[in-house]
Image (tube, rainbow, N blue to C red):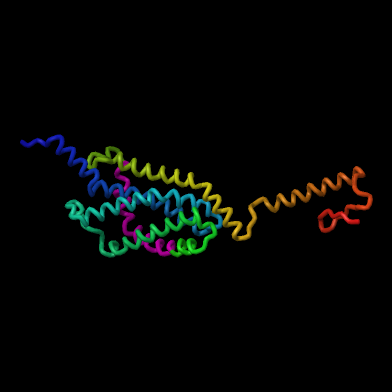
Amino acid sequence: MTTVRPFARDRAAVARAWGRQGNDRLTASVGLVLFVLLAVEAWTTLSLRSYLSLHMFLGLLLVPPVTLKLASTGWRAARYHTGNRAYRIAGPPKLPLRLLAPLLVASTLVLFGSGVGLIVGGHGGGWLQKVHATTFNIWGALIIVHVFAYLGHAFRRGTVDWRRQAGRIVPGARIRRALLGGALLAGVIVALATYPAQQAFHRERDESQGLRPAGTANSGLLQQEMDAASADADVAQGNAHPTMKLSTIGGSHVRFR
């Protein structure tokens, strides 16, 4: 009868936790979360005039989870191409998806990079806005194919780490959950920390389009009404200049000789 030494047993557990199976679970769980958040982000583009604030906030919140997803898929590709046995046995994705992957990664980097650039320094739009809009159309077509190819697998594997006794077969469930939760928390921190820049984007965008902030026009009318009321009070008290008379033309109070 052979016994397994504790060191060998621990090494095997670590290999399963951070090997192909653990990476597969992490990639799938992050993918599920991104599926929901990106769906909301895409929905905001249907009416950016109304949902631009939400679009910007979600875009910044998505940066850390997207980075985690790129890291997990990049690790899988690196391990496969460096000859790791477990990844070699699992095999690569189907050829069309392998050809699609570099384009999807590149468009993702350009899309989020141009979006962050717009908020930080490109308030007036210009070429950054054109790059962002064009890349979104390309990325949208690629991500639709990606979602249809992997969504079923993500639902099957992405929820396993959230079940009871999830780490019995593949250890490391707590760490993988912590990585995903940490990425989401980091996203919220990034979005909140850049909120002043987001508001500055709105102000400069309105100014570049010749729009006054809400309430500016109303405050002007209020000031006119207050001036008119003050003039009425002067007339009633006999304080107006003897050669001046108050008249109303088109709803506005005017003094004339």
Name the dominant secondary structure of the magenta segment. Answer: helix
User: Which quarter of the rendering shows the N terminus?
Assistant: top left
Across and down, in percent, residue 239 comes to 90, 44
Q: Is residue 115 left or right of residue 215?
A: left
Instruction: State which quarter of the image contains the C terminus.
Output: bottom right
Outermost residue, right side = 242
Expressed as whole percent of the image width and height from the top left, the position of residue 159 reads: 32, 46
Which residue corresponds to the image point at 74% horizontal and 49% vertical from the top-left?
222
Q: Quadrant of residue 93?
A: bottom left
Q: Is residue 39 left or right of residue 1?
A: right
Residue 146 coordinates in the image, percent (x, y): 34, 59
Residue extending farthest left: 1
Q: Residue at x 21, y 44 (%)?
A: 16
Q: How many marks?
A: 0
- Observer-nearest residue: 130 or 66? 130
Q: For this rendering, which residue is in front, 119 or 156? A: 119
In which quarter of the view is residue 211 placed?
Answer: bottom right
State left or right for residue 186 relative to residue 196: left
**Where's residue 186, x and y in %?**
41, 44
Residue 53 lies in the magenta-colored region: no
Q: The magenta stretch spans which residues?
A: 135-162
Could you tell me which residue is drawn at 53 percent across and 54 percent down? 52
The residue that appears at 32% across and 59% down in the rendered structure is 149
Residue 156 within the magenta-colored segment of the rendering = yes
Q: Is residue 192 left or right of residue 106?
A: right
